[in-house]
Image: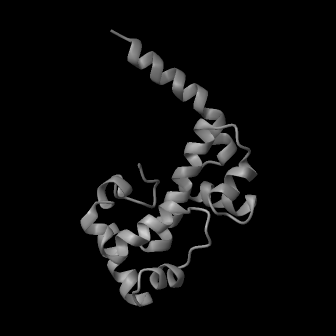
Amino acid sequence: MDFPKNGRRHFHFWEEYAGAKTLKDGRGRALALIHGDIAASWSVDTLAKEVDLSRSAFMDRFAQLIGMPPIRYLTVWRLEIAKRHLRESRMSIPQIAVAVGYESEEGFRRAFKREFEIWPAEWRHQLPALRERATCAHSRP
């Protein structure tokens, strides 16, 4: 997963942290919960309760391992999944907003713009040109 401007670390959280060792602690279980139901109304309190940690202990441990607070991670993950939907599906933007856990299209659009400095519809419309450039670059000798 490539992070947008506000998430400086560049690695694949799920693949890197979903190993058996990590899944035994609260951070890994929290990741599994988030990834298992991205549209759920997750909060720090809910996640902490699910993994049997106090709110502050959960936030500290999660941020220590992941490099960002849990809700920040949830936002970044939701927006990465939204980009995948925009790229690979014909879902409408309101449908994508609901699928990744936003209660309103407007909230989703604002979050996407804040992260990627482009509106979701604009990002989707740029994809054909980006694909064409990538294809041309790969076909050069």
Which residue occupies 68% across, 56% down?
97
Q: Is residue 71 above or below residue 136?
A: below
Residue 74: percent from left, percent from top: 50, 66
Residue 33: percent from left, percent from top: 48, 68
Which residue occupies 61% across, 33% down?
126
- Residue 48 image-quadrant placement: bottom left
Seen from the viewer's position, the closer of residues 52 and 6 is 52
Do we see residue 109 in this rendering? no
Which residue occupies 37% across, 58% down?
8
Furthest-top residue in this view: 141
Do we see residue 119 in this rendering? yes
Seen from the viewer's position, the closer of residues 87 and 123 is 87
Q: Is residue 108 above or below residue 89?
A: below
Lateral position of residue 62 relative to residue 114, left or right: left
Residue 137: percent from left, percent from top: 41, 19
Residue 18: percent from left, percent from top: 33, 60
Figure quadrant of the C terminus: top left
Which residue occupies 44% across, 88% down?
55
Seen from the viewer's position, the closer of residues 81 and 53 is 53
Lateral position of residue 64 relative to residue 116, left or right: left
Q: Is residue 1 above or below residue 63?
A: above
Lateral position of residue 78 relative to residue 91, left or right: left
